[in-house]
Amino acid sequence: MASEPSRGDNVSWESSQGKVKGKVVKKLVQPSKIKGHVVAASEDNPEYLVRSEKTGAMAAHKPEALKKR
């Protein structure tokens, strides 16, 4: 992604089920737990919490995995 996403941005990403569309909920800059999985986010290695439009499921993704739409 050319520029980092911001809260509220509409984004898409690839999953094992194909392309998923969703919205950025927040930027993670410290380790967090999402659905029982520890996300090793930091200031130097941020991840983004996103919500799927279709299912409402939350997931964390690195900025390079997200595309603004």
Image (cartoon, grey):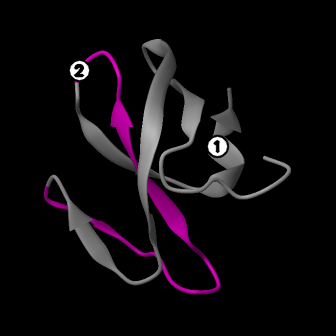
Q: Secondary structure at mark 1?
A: helix
Q: Position of residue 59 (x, y in %)?
A: 34, 46
Tell me where residue 19 appears, x and y as whole percent: 54, 16
Q: Tell me where residue 13 sits by quadrant.
A: top right
User: How busy is the neighbourhood of tag 1: few (under 14 within 10 Å), some, or many (20 plus)?
Assistant: some
Disc on res. 38: none
Q: Is 54 within the magenta?
A: yes
What residue would you read off at disc 2?
55
Compare residues 24 and 40 and report the one nearer the observer.
24
Which span of residues is magenta-colored?
36-55
Which residue is drawn at the image coordinates 13% and 59% (left, top)? 36
Looking at the rendered structure, the kind of residue marked 2 is Thr
Q: Secondary structure at mark 2?
A: loop
Does residue 51 appear left or right of residue 13 in this picture? left
Alpha-carbon distance for marks 1 and 2? 19 Å
| x and y percentages locating residue 35 in the rendered image | 16, 52
Q: Which mark is residue 65?
A: 1
Q: Is residue 23 above or below residue 56?
A: below
Q: Quadrant of residue 10?
A: top right
Give the residue drawn at x 65%, y 55%.
Answer: 63
The answer to which of marks 1 and 2 sits earlier in the sequence is 2
